[in-house]
Image (spheres, rainbow, N blue to C red):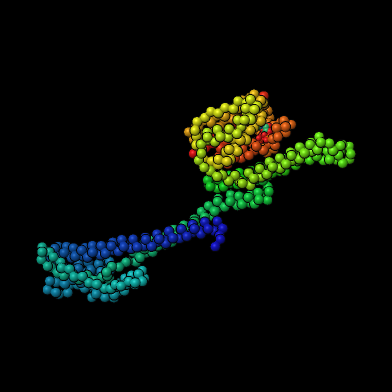
Amino acid sequence: MKRKLKTSLITSYVLLALISTILISILANIFLENQFKDYVINNQKNRTNQIIASFSKTYIAEKRWDVAVVENIGVGAMEYGMIVSLYSPAGKKLWDAREHNNGICEAMIKHMSQNMISHFSYWKGGYMEETKEILVNSKIVGTVKIGYYGPYFFTDNDLAFLKTLNEIIILVGVVSLVLAVIVGIMMASNISRPIVRVISTAQRITKGHYKERINENSKIIEINELTGTINNLAENLGVQETLRKKLTGDVAHELRTPLTTLQTHMEAILDGVWEPSMDRIESCYEEIIRINRLVGDLEKVARFDCDNMALDKTKFDLKELTQKTLMNFQSEAMNRKITLSFEGEQTSIIGDKDKITQVLVNLLSNALKYTPDGGRVQVLINSQKDCTELFIKDNGIGIAEEDLPHIFERFYRADKSRSRKTGGSGIGLTITKAIVDAHGGEINVLSKLGEGTEFYVKLKRS
Ligand code: ADP
């Protein structure tokens, strides 16, 4: 059954308070009643001993049984629920509480029985008698019979005490329940308020309001993490949306130039302004090739995007892979008299070998592409404790400072006319960065126009 957070929290707190109160009440009653029972039984024994001691004392003082004093002791014992009768050593009855006032004795026993039955529904008890000898100087001077309600009994005061105790427990229970509800409501609103905000913000984000942010500052760490994550999500979605819009614009822009050229050429030929000479057809053909290359590049980007960069990770040596990749560039470097050097030690990393090869190919082809003949391209691998660094440095044309922050963006070309000649469409570095990011790595660039460029890639070690 689905419930609101508030209801769940309050129910749990109330249940907890209820269970605790019931448990405390049961345990307190069991424990206290046992203690109380021992106390009452002890008391009864003490009183019996006291009565015997009082009888001996009066006998020692009087050297005989003074009925008036005996009656005093007997009446005093009745106040504690004890029915006393005293006999001489010869068995003659000297004083009997029942004879003194049988009505009171019967009423007393009945009252005690009622007390116990009112407290214990399962109670089994009744009138009991104990006979004790009264000794003076080791001589039996009399026998006392003490009758009481047994095995033990609670007086009105005892019962009142137990009743008060239960009333206190009930009061504590009621107060705990009220507190549980209040704390439950407070806790629930503390937790649910930001969650409700998160839900409504997330709903607005779903509808495309990517600028929406949650400013709730909760004392609960997890809630803060949740709001932070939703804010990041909104931020990322906003960036993605901007990129998507930019991409559409960029693609349209990239396609428009060759298509317009083609259109004007064709129109001129159709209108008879131009002869369909070999040169004209060749020029149109080149534009078609450019459009085709562009579409090919778009497919590549789409593939990397759709792939969501699923990595087929294995453990391999980056030095070996770099040297192998470098071999493919050696003939071009030789033809253009570019010095291609490598330095580095063995370093194993865990990653997608094909995709890391793609990174090397993109960076190396750029380095060669943007380095004039006779230049220099250096590759360096540096193995650190927990990461591997790859440097690809050239002394080529370099990148202008204003272009540097954008070179990893899609279709960004530092120098459009020059890149057009070199055939670049500005997606190589976008793909390179995406691959490095997917590996949890880092890519950076240092460059100075006219002096050269250095790409730096940091990858986690295995
Ligand atoms: P492209 O296919 O145009 O080379 P990239 O994404 O690989 O696209 O690079 C983006 C731009 O960054 C390039 O157009 C170029 O202007 C610049 N660039 C990349 N690498 C270098 C380099 N080694 N030297 C100079 N400029 C570079």
Residue sitting at 84 percent across and 38 percent down? Answer: 276
Lateral position of residue 392 relative to residue 115, left or right: right
Q: Position of residue 21 (x, y in %)?
A: 43, 60
Q: Position of residue 401 (x, y in %)?
A: 67, 28
Outermost residue toward the right?
Answer: 272
Q: Position of residue 436 (x, y in %)?
A: 58, 38
Quadrant of the rendered structure where residue 95 is?
Answer: bottom left
52 vs 262, nearest the viewer: 262
Lateral position of residue 431 relative to residue 149, left or right: right
- Give the quadrant of the N terminus: bottom right
Lateral position of residue 245 relative to residue 192, left or right: right
24 vs 335, nearest the viewer: 335
Residue sitting at 72 percent across and 30 percent down? Answer: 418
Residue sitting at 50 percent across and 34 percent down? Answer: 347
Residue sitting at 49 percent across and 55 percent down? Answer: 179
Q: Is residue 5 visible?
A: yes
Q: Is residue 175 visible?
A: no
Lateral position of residue 418 relative to residue 310, left or right: right
Ligand 1 shows up in which quadrant of the image?
top right
Vertical side of 187 occupied by 72: above or below: below
Q: Position of residue 44 (x, y in %)?
A: 25, 65
Total labels drawn = 0
28 vs 369, nearest the viewer: 369
Outermost residue toward the front?
Answer: 278
278 vs 130, nearest the viewer: 278
